[in-house]
Structure formats: structure tokens, C-alpha cells
Amino acid sequence: MIRRPPRSTQSRSSAASDVYKRQDVRNEEVDWDLYRRMIGQWRQVADSYLGDYYPLTPYSLDEKCWLAWQFNRPEQGDGMVQAFRRKQTDADSFQAKLHGLDPGTTYTVTDLDTSATIESTGRELMDRGVSIPVADEPGAALLRYQRKQ
């Protein structure tokens, strides 16, 4: 099973086109490796927040439901998906059907936590989607996709 970094949910919930993170450097409990990893991942997707927004699930406060969205930059051929597994969600994966892709183009999709990649056409990603596993409850996943050159 894929294990995601602890507390990635909180970091990803607060991410936006800019990021303001404040930590007390005297606090010995801060996981600086996780902090650096989350900032590094944010840098890989920050420009995506300026793209087209697509909710992938209905909005809900229900702790049994997944919450996911996509930001797509069609001109650049890239984007990202954020998916959140809440603490009472039974399903350990989410099937995300993407939006706004070029159906005849191949995309490389990368899970930023595991570095696992797949290649699929825009049509496949929009029709069948991409499976996003999240073992932790709660947990979060961050996928980045890029049009293949």
C-alpha cells in the first residue's frame, strides 16, 4: 500500500497560487523534511492554480466523502489534481475523470508523493479517469500532468 507523508493533508488544504508557511524554528517537533518536500511539491504545481478550475466531486462537509478538484492549463498542456480522503471514507482510492484535455494528445501523469507515473491519452483521462490511491484516513494526494512532447 502507498503510504503518504503524514500531515500532507493540512499542507495541501492550505496551498494556493502563493504560499505562506510559518514555522517556529525553535520547535523541535517540526518535521523539516516533510516541510521541504511539501514546498518542493507546491513549486511543481503553483502555476496550475492560475488555470481553469474543475471540481471533481460535489462540495460536501460529509466526512465519508472524497473531495477533489483539478486545475488545468490547456495552453501549456499541464495541470494538477488534488484529492482528499476524509477520515470516515471507506474507499481507499478515487477515480478522477479529468476535464479540458486534448483528446488526441498523450499526457504523463505523476503522483508527486510516490513518483509513480502513467501515460494516457486525454480521451482516456477524461472518459475513464485516473485512479488515485490514498491509504491514510484522512489523507491527500497531489498529481501533476503534462502533455507529452
Image: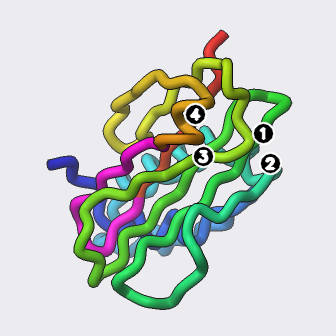
Residue nearer the viewer, 100 or 68: 100
Q: Is residue 136 above or below residue 74?
A: below
The span shown in magenta is 129-140
Q: Is residue 88 above or below residue 128?
A: below
Q: Closer to the N terminus: mark 1 or mark 3?
A: 1
Q: Is residue 30 visible?
A: no
What type is the residue that disc 1 sits on?
Answer: Arg
Residue at the disc numbered 3: 98
Q: Are marks 2 and 3 in contact (CB under 8 Å)?
A: no
Alpha-carbon span between mark 2 and mark 4: 13 Å
Reply above or below: 124 against 99. above
Q: CA distance from mark 2 to mark 3?
A: 14 Å
**Residue placed under numbered mark 4 in the picture:** 145
| Disc nearest the viewer among 3 and 4 | 3
Judged by depth in the image, the label closer to the viewer, 1 or 3, is 3
The answer to the question of whether label 3 and label 4 lie on touching residues, with beta carbons closer than 8 A, is yes
- Residue occupied by mark 2: 51
- Looking at the rendered structure, the secondary structure element under dot 4 is strand
Q: Earlier in the sequence, mark 2 or mark 4?
A: 2
The residue drawn where x is 65% and y is 64% is 55
Q: Report which residue position mark 1 lands on.
A: 73
The answer for how far apart the CA atoms under marks 1 and 4 are is: 10 Å
- Badge 2 or badge 3: first in the primary sequence: 2
Q: Earlier in the sequence, mark 1 or mark 4?
A: 1
The quarter of the displayed image where residue 126 is located = top right
CB-based contact (under 8 Å), mark 2 and mark 4: no
